[in-house]
Image: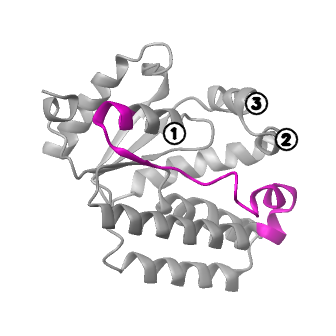
Amino acid sequence: MNLREKYGIPEDAVITIAGTVGVGKSTMTKTLAEALDFKTSFENVEENPYLEKFYDDFKKWSFHLQIYFLAERFKEQKRIFEDGGGFIQDRSIYEDTGIFARMHMEEGTMDLVDYNTYIHLFEAMVLTPYFPSPSVLIYLDGPLDGIISRIHERGRSMEQQTPITYWEEVYGRYEEWIDSFDACPVLRLNITEYDLVNNPNDVESILEKIGDVLNN
């Protein structure tokens, strides 16, 4: 019996990993995909033409960045749908809408007209058959100081140079967002309670929790 069958995880499940920058979404995505023999869906950061520009000038590039992310994530959703599931997804489209776009609108670094255009596009996309909700969303959480340390140690240079106040704001908004998120079942994991890099067997306890959520 493989691990997917052992913990009662359907072969067509779509498991989405959410959480702020530096919390370990990519590591969790790779580890779960390997354990379950699932495909992965990652952000295409390296080819993003707006990301570096955005960190240099939030107000000028926030709308462009969010539209780019929206288009890329929709293409990934369509791919997942057409492949019939069996995916681990690094980051959700719901975070872009509920956290980043809203934050920039409220902070004045995205024009209100642009924000409304973005929201209308998002709403039109999620109503299509290509946009099924995830089977479960895994929310990775942990102490803010530890997350900021990870960003400074391992983050991209543009993230390392971003003021700490920005990450503090994002962290707070993530906490508010997950408390009201209801698009699918949620499994909350504290990053201090496992170590997938040094203790690979920790993945089994996580798989057990995923199975419990999906079957209850």
Q: Label 1, label 2: how many angstroms apart (C-alpha)?
A: 21 Å
Q: Are marks 1 and 3 in contact (CB under 8 Å)?
A: no
Q: Secondary structure at mark 1?
A: helix
Instruction: Inspect the magenta stretch and tell me whether residue 53 lies in it.
Output: yes
Residue 80 x %, y %: 36, 61
Q: Left of 130 or right of it: where is 122?
A: right
Instruction: Please name the residue shown 48% across and 70% down the image.
Output: 74
Front of the two marks 1 and 2: 1
Q: Which of the two discs, 1 and 2, labels the residue nearer the N terminus?
A: 1
Give left or right: position of 3 versus 15.
left
Residue name at image x 51 percent, y 64 percent: 73
Residue 152 marker: 3
Q: Quadrant of the C terminus?
A: top left
The residue sitting at 20% across, 47% down in the picture is 11
Disc number placed over residue 41 in the picture, else none: none
Please name the residue that numbered disc 1 is placed on: 25
The residue where tag 2 is placed is 161
Query: Who is closer to the viewer here, 61 or 172?
Result: 61
| Rendered location of residue 128, percent (x, y) | 35, 80
Foreground residue among 64 and 99? 64
Can residue 3 be seen in the rendering of this structure? yes
| Horizontal and vertical percent position of residue 191 | 48, 27
Q: Residues within 10 Å of mark 2 (few under 14, many from 20)?
A: few
